[in-house]
Image (cartoon, grey):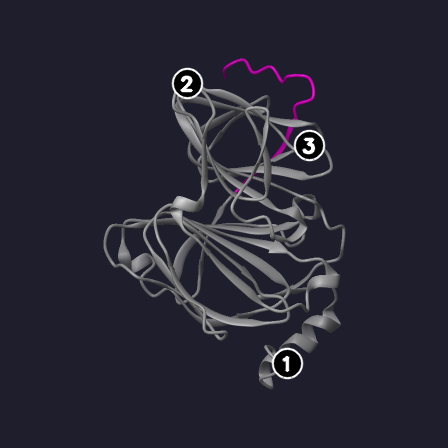
Amino acid sequence: MQDFTLNSGSRPAIRALASQASADGAGVKIRRVAGFQAPELSPFLMIDEIRSENPDDYIAGFPPHPHRGIETLTYMLSGEFEHRDHLGNRGAIRQGGAQWMRAGRGIVHSEMPSQGEGGMHGFQLWINMAAKDKMTKAEWRDIQPDEIRELALDDEGSQARLITGEWVVNDAEVAAPLTEAAAEAAVADIRLAAGAEVTLPLPKDHTAMAFVYRGSLQTERGSIGRGNLVLYGEGEAVQLRALADGAGLLLLHGRPLNEPVAHYGPFVMNTREQIEQTLRDYNNGTLTDY
């Protein structure tokens, strides 16, 4: 293991979680990190990664299905998905772009691949909503690739693509194109050159974590390879170092909600009674009534 010295004020890596093979929608193959019963990950609930060159793994997509009580963020490195929902929204997410959806009280939507060849690599994050906001009106927004802020992190080609939230990069405060995400949730795609090391300040009271999707990340606990989520402890900044193969990662931070979580399928509320009411609303057709 290479030596790694944690700078003063940097957050220690306290835990690593491996993604697990799973399937969702109409049989789409994914790898998932689920944190519904892990309050230390709050406000983030789940990270799904779709990564395949085989259309059979993803072509069936995610036909119409409901949600309540969460926000989702979908981000594509390659491939395309088309979103449609009961509100009449429709939009394609292509390479380098993102889509944000606030389910609020209720939304019914579909996410279907709009191309069959060329492979698919992307992510969907579930972000919890505060109890006081769970029954708000549903919203949706496309974030096109040219809207995402791209900033150089060094002279070696390391780069940050800011998707949601507020960041400090190169000593400057920078806002991503989407700042309305629940619990001040912020997501950036960090791409590190071989052996590069960068430090990014983060709010002290926010949860911080990184999902490695390419290469390896060095920490004081050892190297973290592709498909693993690193949870960071307390501190004022996160210190990221790539190994010789470089690294690509989603860096996340957000304000922990510190509220109970009740989860059933596509619904996330605060109590079992609320989940039961949600199921009744869905079954009697009033989930999306306002």
Q: Earlier in the sequence, mark 3 or mark 2?
A: 2
Q: Which residue is mark 2?
A: 155
**Quick check: marks 3 and 2 in contact, CB under 8 Å?**
no
On the image, the x and y values in percent for residue 6 come to 63, 18
Q: Which residues are magenta?
A: 1-18
Neighbour tally class for label 2: few under 14, some 14-19, many 20 plus, Cα within 10 Å: few
On the image, the x and y values in percent for residue 192 come to 43, 27
On the image, the x and y values in percent for residue 144 come to 40, 51
In this orientation, does residue 265 appear?
no
**Magenta-span inclusion, residue 16:** yes
**Secondary structure of the residue carrying numbered label 2:** loop
Position of 60 with respect to 232 (left or right) is left
Q: Which residue is mark 1?
A: 281
Report the amino acid beneath label 1: Asp
**What label does residue 233 carry, if any?**
3
**Secondary structure of the residue carrying numbered label 3:** loop
Q: Earlier in the sequence, mark 2 or mark 1?
A: 2
The residue drawn where x is 59% and y is 21% is: 220
